[in-house]
Image (cartoon, helix red, strand yellow):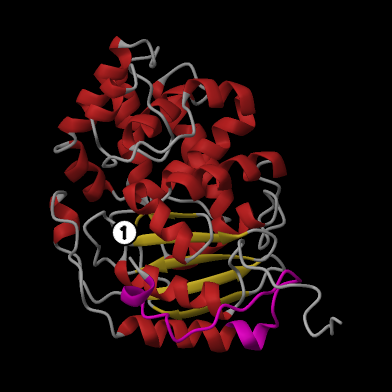
Amino acid sequence: MRASELGINDIGTAVDTGPVPPDDRIDALTEAAYRRALEHAEGSVADYIPILAAVDPEGFGICVADVNGGVHEVGDTRLTFSIQSISKAFVYALLCDTVGHEAVFDMVGVNNTGLAFNSVVAIELNDGHPMNPMVNAGAVATTALMPGGSAAEKWDAVRTGLSRFAGRELRVDEEVYRSEAATNHRNRAIAQLLESYGRIQTDPLDAVDVYTKQCALLVDAHDLAVMAATLADGGVNPVTGEKVVSAEVCRDTLAVMAASGLYERSGEWLFEIGLPGKSGVAGGLITVAPGKVGIGAYAPRLDSAGNSVRGQVATAYLSRALGLNIFASDSHFSGRTYE
């Protein structure tokens, strides 16, 4: 979405390379972001997964978790929904923490495909390489590489790891899982194509099943904010104090999110909002301001690329108003007189 579509042309870009803003300022601006985004009713809920087509399109919550452990939330922040593709970022982080930077770089890749998240053509065009972990091919490959000698062990590693990011035990929405498992023909085809290129060494259908379960994990906007804040705080959950992954892994994960987190709209997102982010087709959206905050949003109306409309609007406002854009700077010579 462009700045004009996001409704932020009237918001000056604050520059703040210092510490986390004061609590009262975050509270006030989170409320303002919510009210502004509430005016947007464009977009449609995901309808290619039957259970997602039945959700209330008016559900909306925005939560900001800071690296000091503070939580600031407005709206339906405790309304649960399936995490969907947002899980890709955290499974990728867990894998990086297990096998290391170079190995994941070689096996999964970091480059944007420029094509839809479930593209088969992208695999063929790149000689069977999944390209990055934020598209379905890369995510299935990432899940297949998780530690464990069986699908059950891999699933336990995924669920346990994402629960540590959230700071509470996450569970699967069985209805969402069954709905997706009955309609994930394309992901099964992608996995088998990857197997034909030697990118998946385990049973490809087992990998898809674990991936389908991880997408069906139930979260809320509060959970997403805490998970994002864990990436913002060098891998330490700021609410529980537990170290989940290393700071180096967070760096790698945020770099991939910045490049590919909003699919083919990732360039627009980075240009307008200037932060690593990841969306999911249930309406979830996470955004990370390194060293400062994680933002979690839920609003199920999506744009044509599958990204939450209200989530983008609210996050764009917070990025500008809180001075979070990682590309924004101001001259340290401001106010100096030159002769």
Q: In the displayed structure, does residue 68 sit left or right of residue 283?
A: right
Any part of residue 172 in sight: no
Q: Is residue 154 magenta?
A: no
Q: Residue at x 31, y 18 (%)?
A: 194
Any part of residue 197 in sight: yes
Front-most of 72 and 169? 72
Span highlighted in magenta in the image: 3-26
Q: Is residue 22 magenta?
A: yes
Q: Is residue 188 above or below residue 78?
A: above
Is label 1 in a helix, a strand or a loop?
loop
> Where's residue 238, x and y in %?
68, 61
Q: In the displayed structure, does residue 138 sit left or right of residue 97?
A: left
Name the amino acid, label 1: Asn
Q: Residue at x 61, y 40 (%)?
A: 252
Q: Residue at x 37, y 10 (%)?
A: 198
Q: In the displayed structure, does residue 170 sit left or right of residue 203?
A: right
Q: Quadrant of the C terminus?
A: bottom right
Q: Is residue 324 above or below residue 307?
A: below
Q: Residue at x 43, y 33 (%)?
A: 132
Task: State whether the magenta stretch is mostly helix, strand or loop.
Answer: loop
Q: In the displayed structure, does residue 258 sit left or right of residue 26?
A: left
Residue position marked by numbered label 1 in the rendering: 307
Front-most of 208 and 285? 285
Q: Quadrant of the N terminus?
A: bottom left
> Where's residue 50, x and y in %?
13, 52
Front-most of 275 and 220? 275
Front-most of 225 and 129? 129
Q: Residue 290 falls in which quadrant of the image? A: bottom right
Q: Residues within 10 Å of mark 1 (few under 14, many from 20)?
A: many
> Where's residue 207, x and y in %?
34, 25
